[in-house]
Image: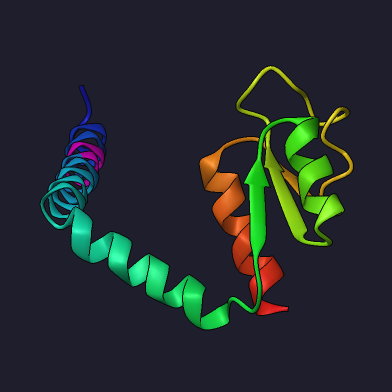
Amino acid sequence: MPRTLKIILKLIAGIALIVILVFFGLLWYVNSHKEKVLKLVNTELNNKLDGTIVIGDTPRDIACARADDLRCFAVTTGRFGPEELAGADGVAGDAAALRGLLESALSG
C-alpha cells in the first residue's frame, strides 16, 4: 500500500474518531443537563411567543385551533399525512422539523 494512501486513511480515521467523540460528548451533555437545556429552549420560545399556539397531529386539533382563532402547527407523527393536515399554519414531518418551523414562525 502506498505511503500517501496510508497517511490519508489515518487522517480520515482520526477525523472520524473526533466526530464520534464530539457526538458522544454532546449526547452526554444534553442527557446530563436536560432540565437546563429544556428551560433554555422554553425561555427562548416564551420570549418570542405572543399569544397561544396549538401543536397537533390530527385534523381535529386544527379545527379546535381554528374555532378559537389560534395559530396552529401540525406534525405528521400520527396516522394523518400532510394532505389531511394542510389546514394548519405549518406542517412538519417530525419534532426536529417542527422546531425549525416554530423558530421561523416566531422570528418573523
Could you tell whether 52 is left or right of 43 in the image? right
Give the magenta range: 12-16
Q: Quadrant of residue 40?
A: bottom left
The residue lying at 89 percent from left, 43 percent from top is: 87
What kind of colouring is applied to the model shown? rainbow
The residue lying at 60 percent from left, 27 percent from top is: 77
**Quadrant (top left, top right, bottom left, bottom right) of the N terminus:** top left
Choose between 83 and 61: the one closer to the eye.
61
Residue 60 locus on image (x, y percent): 78, 33
Image: 62 above or below 67: above
Could you tell whether 47 is left or right of 34 in the image? right
Residue 71 locus on image (x, y percent): 76, 60
Let me know if residue 15 is in the magenta part: yes
Image: 55 above or below 33: above
Q: Main secondary structure of the magenta part?
A: helix
Q: Residue furthest bottom?
A: 47
